Image (cartoon, rainbow, N blue to C red):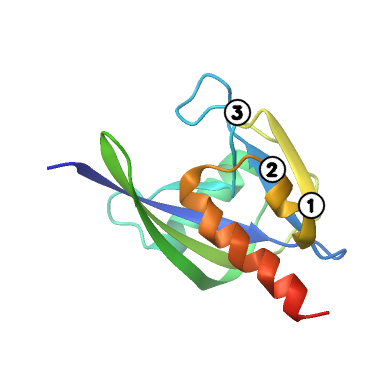
Amino acid sequence: MKNKIKVVGAILENYNGEILCTLRNKDSIFGNLWEFPGGKIENNETPQQSLKREILEELNIKIGSSISYMKVEKEYDDFIIELECFKCEILNDLDIISMVHDKVIWLKRENLLSLNWIPTDISIVEKLSEENVYNK
């Protein structure tokens, strides 16, 4: 039986309506692919607690309230990823310090699909992109 890895991701939107996108380190699994920032849920953590910890550790961003946006389960050769993505409120100024990613960019919804995303994140990216089309 494959190991199931539970992870959380943050959809962080700035005042210009841009979404934060992070490029995984080239030497990591899924290296050179884009993702929403986040990480693994540790023992005794709720998804929201994990998300707050991960975003602060990885990007120096404090988040407040978070609302579940979408859950995705994706099977790979050696494991299964169970991802829950949250829309999150940013509490501090956006002085981002990336500790683990090769690149961090802000991108408009209509441009999100121009990046090469981790397969687990693609359906979330598609949903965000569709929202932009319907909200015009």
Tell me the crowding category of disc 1: few under 14, some 14 to 19, or many 20 or more residues within 10 angstroms, Cα based: some
Q: Which mark is residue 115?
A: 2
Residue pictured at 87% horizontal, 63% vertical: 16
Residue pictured at 49% horizontal, 31% vertical: 30
Above or below residue 90? Residue 56 is above
Q: Which mark is residue 122?
A: none
| Of the pair 133 and 55, the residue shown nearer to us | 133
Q: Earlier in the sequence, mark 1 or mark 2?
A: 1
Q: Amino acid at mark 2?
A: Leu
Name the secondary structure under disc 2: loop
Cα gap from disc 2 to disc 3, whole angstroms: 10 Å
Residue 124: % across, % down: 55, 61
Marks 1/2 in contact by CB < 8 Å: the verdict is yes
Residue pictured at 26% horizontal, 34% vertical: 78
Q: Mark 1 sits on what residue?
A: 107
Above or below residue 136? Residue 45 is above
Q: Amino acid at mark 3?
A: Asn
Cα gap from disc 1 to disc 3, whole angstroms: 17 Å
Q: Mark 3 sits on what residue?
A: 32
Q: Earlier in the sequence, mark 1 or mark 3?
A: 3
Q: Amino acid at mark 1?
A: Leu
Report the residue that reaches farthest toward the left: 1
Above or below residue 70? Residue 82 is above
